[in-house]
Amino acid sequence: MQLSKIAALAIIATGVTQAENYVSVEYLQYDENDNRVSVMAPSLTASYDIGTDYNIKADFVHDSVSGATPSYLPDGASGASSRVTNSTDFIYGKQAFNEERNAGSLVITKRFANRDELIVGGDYSRESDFDAKTVSLEYMHYLNASHNTSLNLGASYGFNEILSFTNSSTTTRNRRDDDRFEREDDYDTSSGASRKETSTSLNVQAGITQILSPTSSMKVAGFAIMDEGYLTNPHAFVVRDYSTAPKLVGENRPDTRRAYGVDLKYITLLGERMSYQVGYRYYTDDWKINSHTIENDLYYKLGKRVTLGAGLRYYTQTEASFYNGAKDYFTNEEFASSDERLSSFDALTYKANLDFKQNDKISYNIGGEFYSQSTGLDATLITVGAKFRF
Amino acid sequence: MIRLMVWSMGTLLLLSGCSIKEVKPWEKGDLAMDIMQYEGLHPEVKKFEAHTYFSKEASRGGAGVAGGGCGCN
């Protein structure tokens, strides 16, 4: 076997980077039950090796998001709500919105003579009320000459700009004729009704990838995430003083969040045509949210052209210390949120996909997923794509 | 938590140094198969999945440091 082939196999086998020149297009259709959120997201990705020492990868995605999310709202009494409270001032209903998001990333990989890798990346995401910029740096270092063990270190820094409301009163959001809120046109920075807030996120990760045998390997990584700034959801409301002088105000979250976790992955070949991957992640933060995630993925090669995939993911989390979904809970607490995503819940994802290789250069994929939360949220994800290698 | 991270990595290092037989380069053909990659056959689909979980759940991390923020959470 040629030395270059051996080196390529060594690089690929660590699972860090799969050297390949390609262009791929993917389309995601995401739909929640009860006519909640729908997302259409076409994306384009290109990866190109410059010689043997550099790779450049870029992607772009456009999200069109529409629908309505459950929240406490000013009373519309128009049938927009699914759970009308006893108060005449507000309801628990659906907050309608439309959003467009454009996001892109650029990643440059430098491979050194010993095949260590330095990876520099940048991400940019823009929507009408949220701008995000992230830079990242990763280094993969082989710990032995056989390239069976690698140390992976990474850090990223994100800077976000969020359009929010200057006070939490419902009067800062414009009512629409249909008693729902549209995010567009709600903001009025010139009059001071809304303003820009900022937040930052520092994410560090350290891990090891170890080849265990000719047919199995594993990864373990520890991570820490430090968020600071405006971490409140500017679109979410809570009810305060329900039993005395009820009022609907914007939620308020702490302006810092420290999170830590461990991620473990193991992959093995079962027979000649089937692979099995299992992963576990533990997460904890100082908002008192703890979560466990277990993922299982199975791939089966049905002949030379067709690959079938199936997966099952289980997720469970505890609620944030300042979360409560009841309308009569909050009084004068500094931090308060009724955002369902901060509640305690379990979730299951069922996955199936098919990959068809037309030839060595062109392949197509189609996949479907069903996501179900114990909160009552159900969602389907359909992905369709094609990849052209050159 | 830090202790747990250090413990996990230390355990793997110990395993790698003590009890794992070295795999030679010419034995890595199966590991190079597309079905043996951690990100699956289609990293772009994994990215969609990760974005969905990020927008519907309250925890994140572990899958690398790249990737930007989003107003969806």
Image (cartoon, rainbow, N blue to C red):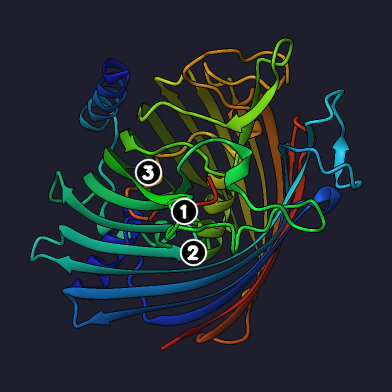
Other residues around mark 2 within 10 Å, as few (<14) / some (14–19) / many (≥20): some
Task: Residue at 61%, 58% (x, y): give it.
Answer: A183
- Residue A127's label in the rendered image is 2
How far across and how far down the image is residue A27, in percent?
63, 73
Q: Which residue is mark 3?
A: A213
Question: Badge 1 is on which residue?
Answer: B70
* Residue A1 visible (yes or no): no
Which residue ends up furthest to the left in the rendered image?
A113
Label 3 SS: strand
Vertical side of A339 occupied by A320: above or below: above
Circle 3 packing at 10 Å, graded few (<14), some (14-19), many (20+), is: some
Could you tell me how far apart the alpha carbons at marks 2 and 1 are, in whole angstroms?
8 Å
Asked whether residue A130 is in view, the answer is yes
Q: Which amino acid type is shown beneath numbered disc 3?
A: Ser
In depth, the one of A362 and A320 nearer the eye is A320
| Amino acid of disc 1 | Cys
User: Are circles 2 and 1 on residues that touch, CB within 8 Å?
Assistant: yes
Q: Nearer the viewer, mark 2 or mark 1?
A: 2
Asked whether the residues under the numbered discs 3 and 2 touch, taking CB atoms below 8 Å apart as contact, a structural biologist would say: no
